[in-house]
Amino acid sequence: MHLANQSSQATIAQFDRYVIPNYRRFPVSLIRGEGSWIWDAEGHQYLDFFPGWGCNLLGHCAPRVVEAVRDQVGRLIHVPNTWYMESQGALAEALSERSFGGQCFFCNSGAEANEAAIKLARAFAHENGRFKIMSMEGGFHGRTYAALTATAQPKYHAGFEPMVPGFFYVPYNDLGAAARALDDQTAAILVEPVQGEGGINVPTAGYLAGLRRLCDQRGVLLILDEVQTGMGRTGRWFAYQHEGIVPDILTCAKALAGGVAAGVMMARTPVAAVFKPGMHASTFGGNPIACRAALAAIETIEAEGLLERGIAIGARFRDQFEALRAELPHLVRDIRILGTMIGLDLTVDATDVVSECMRRRLLINATHHHVVRLLPALTITDDQIDQGCAILADVLRQVVA
Ligand SMILES: Cc1ncc(COP(=O)(O)O)c(C=O)c1O
């Protein structure tokens, strides 16, 4: 069945009739993307500072990813995990070698990766009577039941109670609170190295290392949710590498496969060994298309020096935003940046800023009402950064005017 290449309005009408309205959507239909540019059905061109909600870390339609998917789709689209696949093995090796030498379980999304991590941690600690999971206030781990329960934000639980038993929460970036709350039934601490949805909250240096020490002292597993921070987003393959520690379990999704749906849970081998055949599974997890796409993403990052570029991008945004803060001190409350995780904390509602930027063809995101969140591509050019920041600055000047 061919698509009709219809207008945005026609597509919106179709959605109104046939798609469950569980998302707030911008009133345009997007049809094509290239790097940090994207076009709608009417031919309008947008500069995208938030490509694919963090999934398109290499920009839209990264050439190596497109080529790998095109090649794979003509050979083998899907085989179940009852068979071996070279692409899955190669990706597991590539990820393991770029992280902490553990083993991988593949799935399709961040929530699924976190479900796997929670199950693995409980299975590992089962013999010792440990089952509780500690997570952090303001965190985000996904919408499936255990991941949602770990997401310590009441607004996401409302209407879905009762939640899964055995979860408890402490404030983020507070080692003392974590130490006091741990008990002999705690199996794992689940934490984002930088809180993404929570407002780009970068913890104090030493926080993750402190959690690692605490876990070692108390016989608890450390699970890092790198669904948003992983795969080069912060200028390292994984954000924990800024702190020189090693997690027991790590989850990653979003940018993993250059925009193709994919998720992974990695675990240190002695922990991973607890999962025996039949204990966990994902039908589409680790399929050849996703794995080839992820391998192409890794190749792109290494061939183009994009980890280093991520640091430079963050520095350029920081310069732009520091100038803005000097100009509009009452509007800019804080600037929080680690590589290409960028948060501009405002004293005003950021949702209006998002709408006005969109009108001016700049795509950005707002989280927690007052934080402008940007997750730009590692392939964005300096000119594109400057161009988008000029639009954003102009919109903010208008807000205060
Ligand atoms: C840190 C973190 N964990 C988990 C998730 C859930 O990922 P998914 O939407 O792929 O299930 C997200 C999504 O934004 C995230 O940012």
Image: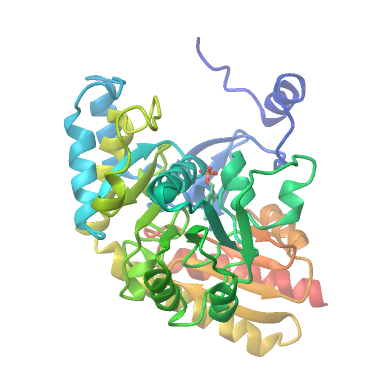
Whole-percent x, y for residue 298 in the image:
26, 51
Name the residue at 61% across, 40% down: 145
- Does residue 90 appear anywhere in the picture? yes
Whole-percent x, y for residue 167 in the image:
61, 54
Residue 29 or residue 188, whichever sits in front? 188
Instruction: State the residue lying farthest toward the front.
Output: 128
Quadrant including the C terminus: bottom right
Residue 316 figure quarter: bottom left
Residue 184 or residue 44, whichever sits in front? 184
Instruction: State the residue lying farthest toward the top.
Output: 1
Residue 327 or residue 218, whichever sits in front? 218
Image side of residue 125 versus residue 96, left or right: right
Rendered view: 336 above or below 10: below
Residue 178 figure quarter: bottom right
Whole-percent x, y for residue 225 in the image:
46, 56
Image side of residue 285 versus residue 22, left or right: left
Residue 84 or residue 210, whichever sits in front? 210
Whole-percent x, y for residue 386 in the image:
51, 71
Q: How many marks?
A: 0
- Does residue 299 appear anywhere in the picture? no
Rendered view: 90 above or below 21: below
Residue 14 figure quarter: top right
Name the residue at 31% across, 29% down: 287
Image side of residue 209 versus residue 42, left or right: left
